[in-house]
Image: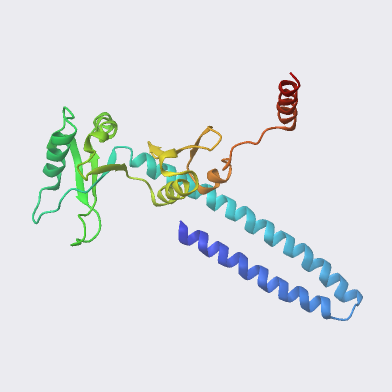
Amino acid sequence: MDSLKDSLNAMAEMFQQKMSEFQQGLDSAPTTSTNASLAAEFSSFRTFVLSAMNTLQRQVEFLGTEVDRLETRRRRKMLLVHGVSEEKSEDVTSRVCNVVGEHLGVTGLSVSSIKSSHRLGRPSDKKPRRIVVKFADATLRDKVWFSKTGFKGSGITVSEFLTRSRHDVFMEARQRFGVNKCWTRDGCIHIIAPDGSRHRAECKADLHCIPQSSKPLTQGTASLSSRSKRTIKNK
């Protein structure tokens, strides 16, 4: 989907460049009735093409959003486990069960309650790879998720398995509003804005709608405050 968006953007830029070059040629040509008619037809054609490109881009963005939502729902029973030491010929599912049972004390968790689990990426000597865990039941997944504070101080953490686009939105939200003001739940990014209002975001466009500073005092409130100070002073 990202490659399709990039192709559309490149195509739009190419149209803009070629049409600008053609427009410059028309502007520099001698003014005649034929050239005037050609310029009018070109202007109409250019408007049509740009409108069609904009419509196509909006449709692709909508399709991308829907695909992202479907993928997010598909990951509903999944979690990422970070910081679990890695061993050769390990049974990843058993290790997850042992780690969760030791630190979180979640009841009902067994090898049979995990549908699949595996590490992501290539092995590295620097740090253990993340483990993506798919639970057989969403309720058990939620028990682990809401008990994750039990990992505090162990070096192990749990996060939601966000899609790439939502992960990028989450990272940008933390940069804008602060780490402690942003969290995820069921694949959605939740944000507390500087004015105290709460917001949900699924894409970067949603972030642009969130106020990044507290609302200043209105003129009426400021005038009332000034009058109150003067009254107190006069007393």
The quarter holding residue 105 reads top left
> Residue 217 location in percent, x, y?
67, 33
Relative to 96, 33 lies left or right: right
State left or right for residue 66 relative to residue 195.
left
Q: Does 33 sit above or below residue 70?
A: below
Q: How far across and down, in percent of the image, does residue 177 sit? A: 49, 43
- What residue occupies the far left of the structure in this picture? 89
Can you say whether 160 is above or below 126 in the image?
above
* Residue positioned 42% across, 49% down in the render: 171
The residue shown at (51%, 63%) is 6
Total marks placed: 0
For the residue pair 193 and 36, the one nearer the viewer reads as 193
Q: Position of residue 173 (x, y in %)?
A: 47, 46
144 left or right of 23?
left
In the image, taking residue 87 as reference, residue 206 lies left or right, namely right
- At x 67% / y 73%, what residue is drawn? 18
